[in-house]
Amino acid sequence: MAAARHSTLDFMLGATADCNAVLKALQPVFQEQGMTETVHNWEDHGYLATYIKKNGSHAEQTLTWVQQENSLFANLRIHPHGLVLVDLQSYSDHTKGREETDQLLNKVEERMKEFFHGNLKRVKRLPTILRGGVIDRYWPTADGRLVEYDIDEVVYDEDSPFQNIKILHSKQFGNILILSGDVNLAESDLAYTRAIMGSGKEDYTGKEVLILGGGDGGILYEIVKLKPKMVTMVEIDQMVIDGCKKYMRKTCGDVLDNLKGECYQVLIEDCIPVLKRYAKEGRMFDYVINDLTAVPISTSPEEDSTWEFLRLILDLSMKVLKQDGKYFTQGNCINLTDALTLYEEQLSRLYCPVEFSKEIVCVPSYMELWVFYTIWKKQTEV
């Protein structure tokens, strides 16, 4: 299946642009391709020129994409302050069509350098964006930057009662688990798992451990190796487990093949009722690992229900954490300083006083530095 290819080419002139001169310099390039022109002049605000193939109507090209060998549509925007933008959209699954697009951009660049070589401060051509393809390669980072992954296969794509579950294959990172558009974990991301377990500084031997979430099985798989007394994992979504035990085995090994093992059990439940039940029963854990969700991007905790959820989880977790126990969780991208600061403020509002430390880790598939927290109950002086 063909995808729409969106190519861009930007020029920054060193001085105020002669919009008419730029237009006249580039008009022949598009005309040579058999494209017809419509020009809009906004007086002091520059020009907008659109170019289409002669054998397609403007409406067809921009709204419904006619199935031609290579449908072309171009925008040329000339700003008086010196910015010249070329946007080229094409629709073709043929190498010939892609070559035609590249040749057109090359000619535009050559013409601009020929006519304005002494006045060009910057030329920038971004990689082509593919839109509407079978494989979606574009996923945003936590701080809103767009990343194109080297994804070449949709391994798994299902909707559970709770979320959309995708597992996509990346040439660099292996299979990547994506939940409702959020990159969760790739097979390359052992750094994430180690960080949320305490970065190798903890002794789990003979300990009671509670994992909240963690449906990819990575944390459970690594902790079981460390000979704990018992690990209880509470995951609400059976379909996440089903997908990961089949397609993320480099992460989870065989630990998800059975919901019970010699030193672990997996409960398919909402963790909040489980935490409340454990608190009522007086059950306590040496470690609580929260792998449910990152710190929200929103900085309005009064309006964002995710903040309420996090506060509730924190309070309930402290109630089942031993006095000398530790609580591990992810924070978010290091660039989200306001959200991370707000999270740290929430820690001072729990029912019991706590202290915390944080660690910054590079998680390969995230392509950004990630903050992890260790939280413990403040020791009272006797």
Image (tube, grey):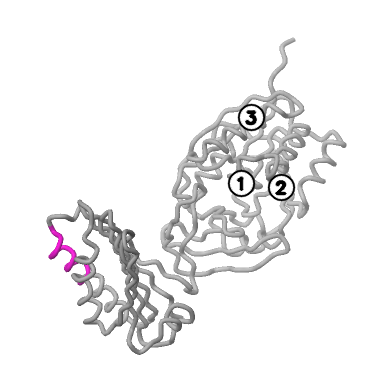
Task: Say which amino acid is labelled 3.
Answer: Glu
Q: In this view, does 367 lie above or below 25?
A: above
Q: How far apart are marks 3 and 1 (CA)?
A: 27 Å
User: For the point 52% across and 48% down, which residue is it?
Assistant: 142
Task: Say which amino acid is labelled 1.
Answer: Ile
Are discs 2 and 1 less than 8 Å apart at CB? yes
Q: Where is residue 330 in the image (x, y as percent from the top left)?
A: 59, 41
| For marks 3 and 1 on the same chain, the one whose residue lies earlier in the sequence | 1
Q: Mark 3 points at which residue?
A: 345
Q: Position of residue 268 (x, y in %)?
A: 76, 55
Quarter location, residue 375:
top right
Q: Mark 1 points at which residue?
A: 219
| For marks 2 and 3 on the same chain, the one whose residue lies earlier in the sequence | 2
Outermost residue to the right: 281
As for residue 43 lying within the magenta part, the answer is no
Q: Mark 2 points at which residue?
A: 233
Q: Residue 163 versus residue 382: which sits nearer the camera?
A: 163
Q: 10 Å neighbourhood of mark 2: few (<14), some, or many (≥20)?
A: many
Nearer mark to the viewer, of 2 and 3 = 3
Check disc 1 and report its element: helix, strand or loop: helix
Outermost residue to the top: 382
